[in-house]
Image (spheres, rainbow, N blue to C red):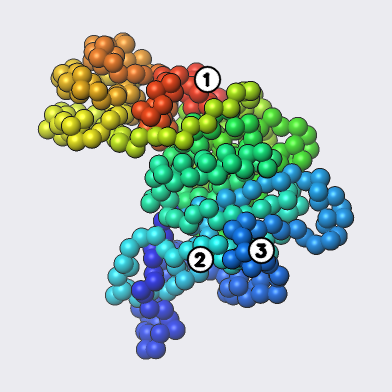
Amino acid sequence: MSRADASGARTRADEGCDASRVRMPFAPGALPRNESFDRVARDVEVPDARASPVKTHARGDATRARGDETKPRVMLFHCGGTLGMGMESFELVRETDVVPRAGGKYRPLGASKYLLDVHAVIPELSDFARLDVEVLMNKDSSEMDGADWVKLARALHERRDEYSAFVVAHGTDTMAYAASALSLMLVGFGKPIVLTGSQLPLSFARSDARQNLIDALTCCCASRSCGGTVDFAEVAICFGGKLIRGNRASKTSATVYAAFSSPSYPTLARLGVGVDWNHARLLRPTTEYAPRFELNANVIRVPVIPGMDLDKAYGDLYGRGVRGIILEAFGVGNFPQSLVPWLTSQAARGLQVYLSTQCQSGELRPELYAAGLGALAVGAKSGPVMTSECAVVKMMLHIANPELELHVSHAGEAGDVDFCDIK
């Protein structure tokens, strides 16, 4: 989730600042801690961050003596987002000050401050696993793109044999896109990859970051932390007490802690006093690992609007470099027949078309309508309902990897679901 970059704003400490005109960028209750974590953790010895981007933490010799080496190794990749934002991003600003741009200021790349926040402020993380942390990138998720997904996928691929599971700290705004991309780029990865983040930074007193990180690690170490074997080995999002299949997730709230929903698939687990696993809905493992690291980002969503002239609204998309569209029709796949000629001309030039729906759940049956049949006749693909985020990413990958068929489910991103079972 993006936060305002207050690097140019004055604070209450500024000489002559009128306290009556000072406001917080968050509602009452979302207050930062009184003391910085730098001071809280100043006595904790952490290796020089410049020596290596990867940090390993253990809770002393006593912990290791209790069998620390038997715990699973888990890598936490930090990619950016609200979770790791520095306190200076949320300083008091005056009403007359203009926030220069969105994004916030993050802790320096590779610096030990962020690692101290994780290891010293949440020491119980090491009760679950031998946790290593690497700051892979440090970006507002709204700035992330296909190149970043490829970088993250390659990092996971390269460390696949070293670790039992992976946690990815990521901004919330495009987390569903990243999760969808990883699930389709790393089909058959065979180990848990859990994305999480927070609505408030770890440095805030009421932050959800602490619980989300603990919950994500709990799911990654399910066989150890949940009292029995859990066959969980897929890309998921853990947020607000729920574990959701990553390519079925959408961000549905900018303010509540349960920011993500799964409109077309049941949750994989609910985390409360215990962990309630939905074993029947976990992705069945496959023995074939087929990583893909190429995508074509020249893809757009085209929602159908009543009375819209697509020729005027979009014109020659292929001529302008677009190579794939997600055509979001009404209901089960219906739209005005007047749009078929435009689709025909664009498909003839090579534009890839996936016929989707503006509904969040239900079936796709475009063959029931003349317009849908017309779209299918000119080469459009359709299939079970996917989230808009997943459909876009899948099209990007399909253009670069034609064997990744649009209408076939490769990583549990689509398929028949009893929608009465959605909770």
Q: Is residue 360 above or below residue 137?
A: above
Say what amino acid the circle numbered 3 marks: Val
Quick one: quadrant of the C terminus?
top right
The front one of 62 and 401 is 401
Q: Which x, y percent locates residue 107?
A: 51, 65
Front residue (pair 109, 14): 109
Extreme residue toward the bottom, this view = 16
Q: State the SS at label 3.
A: helix
Q: CA distance from mark 1 to mark 2?
A: 47 Å
Residue 121, label in figure:
3
Q: Which mark is residue 93?
A: none
Examine the rendered structure and indicate whether residue 268 appears above or below residue 210.
Answer: above
Front tag of 1 and 3: 3
Q: Of the residues under marks 1 and 3, which one precedes in the sequence?
A: 3
Residue indicated by mark 2: 108
For residue 418, the mark is: 1
